[in-house]
Image (cartoon, rainbow, N blue to C red):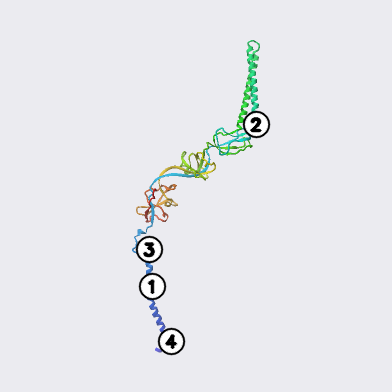
Amino acid sequence: MNMNYESKISGEDVDVSTLEDGDEEARSRKPLVIAAIAVVAAILAVLAYQLFFGSGEAPPAESQAPVVTVVIPGTKDVVRTINATGTLAARREIPVGVVGEGGRVTQVYVDAGDWVKPGQIMASIDRSVQNQQVARWAALVASARADLNLAQANLDRAAALVERGFISKADIDRLTATRDSNAAQLRVNQAQLGEARARNNFLNIVAPKGGFVLERSVEVGQTVSAGSGILFRLAQNGEMELQAQLSESDLANVAVGVNTEVIPVGTDKVLTGQIWQISPMIDSQSRQGIAKIALSYDSALRPGGFASARITSGSTVASVLPESALQNDSKGAFVYIVDKDDKAVRRDVVTGPVSSAGVSISSGLNGTERVVLRAGGFLNPGETVKPALQKKEAGA
């Protein structure tokens, strides 16, 4: 039996001593592997505990709530200000052209930027031919007056001889008719002389109203006539206006007499004006209307230029919030407030005028709520938060 067993083992070339040594080594390493796994698991458990609960005891659930900054806005008077832009123009622009028959310009007395008085001569036109016509009619007037004086004298002498029978009544009638005809001819010649003189006066281009010369379009030597167009443009009394473009809603909130501040583009001047006319129509394409703001003359006002306007249209009592507190979605504007249970609650609001202080809230708040100032976009309705009241700055 022993020989058969040994021969079977040796036939398979198995080293019995080697097999027994390997099993013993594997059995000796097994506790070490188990111990290493246990240590790694313990380390991971500690890390997980510290990650989620920190060191020490597990914190209460409310300490995990996010901290949010809140403010109690209160209410205050909010001045409604409408910002607008528009084009500067003369409030009453007066075009000046040739009134008479025209001719060659001999002298121009004013230029753009000058001031003129009513009736002041702005330019004159050559009148050499017209002066000869005046002289001719003046001579005809003198001749007709002489004829009238002679006819009157003849009539007077004849009237003295009627009673003595030297002159018949028929002669008196003839002399009277001659006198009346000469008188009529004198009146005709006088009318013609007056017309000639009036035409000469029209050769002077005069200012119909006092004001500021905006434009000059005539030069000495130029031939002008009634068809020559506009030679001068005047701003009556130098008054200007801003034609401010306003939306339909803004136009409904302004009125004639409202004070405004106007700042011409390119300057830092702040000019004061008043709305004097509001357009009765709205442009169907732009959906805007015009509010005309009257302005006194100032060198910074140049018709055709642009200017901005700040129009004050009353005041209202409302809460004012910074833009960071406002959120918007498909339902409109809203804010998050923190209720008595420190939960975030959505509150829909209607915004009003925007100023340097913030956005006024027309409706939705009464001013006593705790409003979340920032990070409202990361909150969900009903979420528990830790409110931190923002301290008001000095003078706020």
| Front-lying residue, 250 or 357 | 357
Question: How far apart are labels 2 and 3 at the CA level?
Answer: 110 Å
Label of residue 11 in the image: none
Q: Earlier in the sequence, mark 1 or mark 4?
A: 4
- Provide the secondary structure element on which disc 2 rests: helix
Label of residue 52 in the image: 3
- Provide the secondary structure element on which disc 4 rests: helix
| Front-lying residue, 128 or 223 | 128
Look at mark 1 in the image and give the residue it sits on: 36
Question: How far apart are labels 1 and 3 at the CA level?
Answer: 25 Å
| 247, above or below 236, in the image | below
In the image, what residue type sits under mark 4?
Ser
Q: Residues within 10 Å of mark 4 (few under 14, many from 20)?
A: few
In the image, what residue type sits under mark 2?
Ser
Q: Earlier in the sequence, mark 1 or mark 3?
A: 1
Label of residue 10 in the image: 4
Q: Residues within 10 Å of mark 1 (few under 14, many from 20)?
A: few
Q: Position of residue 9 (x, y in %)?
A: 42, 86
Label of residue 128 in the image: 2
Q: Earlier in the sequence, mark 3 or mark 4?
A: 4
In the image, what residue type sits under mark 3?
Phe
- Provide the secondary structure element on which disc 3 rests: helix
